[in-house]
Image (cartoon, rainbow, N blue to C red):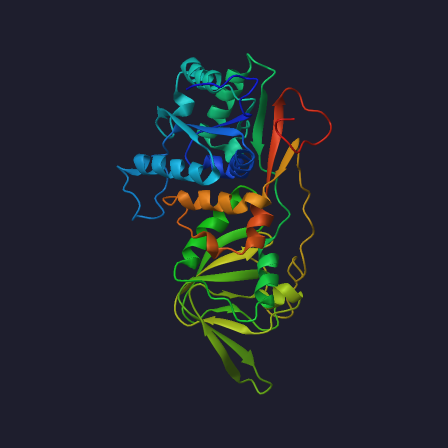
Amino acid sequence: MEIVGSSERPRRILGVFAHPDDEVFCVGGTMAKYAQSGAEAMILCATRGEAGQIRDASVATRAGLGAAREGELRAACAALGVDNVAFLDHVDGTLAGLERQPLVDEVGAVIDDFAPEVVVTFGPDGAYGHPDHVTIGSVTTEACAAQPERRLYYSYFPRSRLMLLERLADWLVELRDRFKGQADFARVFSLFAQETNALGYADDHITVAWFPRGVSIVEHGEVADALYLILSGEVEVTLDQPGGERVLIRRQGVGEFFGEIAIARHTTRTANVTAVEAVTCLVFTRRPPELWAGRGSSASPADGGGPAPEPAVLNDATAVIDVCDVIDRKIAAVAAHRSQYPIEPEMFPRWMLEEMMGREHFVRVNPPPSEEREYDLFG
């Protein structure tokens, strides 16, 4: 790789990760932001992610998944404005078992060749403990140790206070017409919500629940403790009349939410929701449900029907980059990883993307950070 003279060349930033798609969530917006300002950016990926899930069977088979994900990474980087992509040709899931020094040397050779001012990788937690993430982060740290003047950052995921059930409920009740997602919305939103929740972008407890035909999912007058998105099946929404009669208000199906009114208004439930046939829902709650909790207007679960107390949030980031102005590029890059995230960017309201993914957090390792928070990784 040709290196331009240091007195004239643009700033350079390198991300070193384990799998295709790691780059988007760890540093995608930051890469897009710096590339847009003229910096040269590069992603080094240790594997081709061939052990990953296949969430869109039309994209790849198991035998071809590695090649498909390589193409997805290149497309994602193009969306971010990252011109340089390289792979180390290791097998997904094996990094922790490799001989360490050759791997350090491989990463170090790329760093020496590209000569970035800034390197970003995983921290010791590997975002959520994945052995490949932990290993590549540790190896990259060791490879950078010989040049302590080079800025090394760990990608960091502080636990968010954002409650999707509350923000979604507010958004839904503000709409003029009831929301109904397009054909594939429910499946895609389910994948997206659970993955981003695992990374700490939101603090809801998210589960997939199945309700047999005839089950009362929501009861008029009970405490509101969950928001539901229908993934399959159909429900009836009814009101109880003074004489005991139930009046049908509407039927709802796949891609529709229910339960938002009471959540948004902090009231008890305003209607009944019953499964017309077997129904599967993505369920958002403020905390894991208690199996012994009672139901009905006399029940008093810990939730109490109002907002949950704000959890303590540990945010030890030394640098925070606002990427809201390039959020479209970031979500386009996520969508490029179609085998993992078969989404369409326009499925999501912009407020959700900005609130969940509009800031990227980092911890500076080298040189030792100052007490003040940074807003530019290059200093």
Q: Is residue 223 visible?
A: no
Locate the C terminus and report the quarter of the image it occupies. Answer: top right
- Mark count: 0
Residue ranking furthest to the right: 371
Taking 323 as reference, is 364 above or below it?
above
Position of residue 51 measured from the top left corner of the image (x, y, whole percent): 35, 35
Position of residue 143 measured from the top left corner of the image (x, y, whole percent): 50, 16
Residue ranking furthest to the bottom: 243
Locate the N terminus and report the quarter of the image it occupies. Answer: top left
Q: Residue at x 70, y 32 (%)?
A: 373
Could you tell whether 73 is left or right of 267 in the image?
Answer: left
Residue ranking furthest to the front: 8
Position of residue 129 measured from the top left corner of the image (x, y, whole percent): 50, 32
Taking 255 as reference, is 22 above or below it?
above
Q: Residue at x 36, y 25 (%)?
A: 90
Between 269 and 150, the one nearer to me in the picture: 150
Q: Residue at x 56, y 37 (%)?
A: 33
Q: Is residue 180 visible?
A: yes
Taking 143 as reference, is 160 above or below it?
below
Between 13 and 10, the one nearer to me in the picture: 10
Position of residue 319 measured from the top left corner of the image (x, y, whole percent): 65, 32
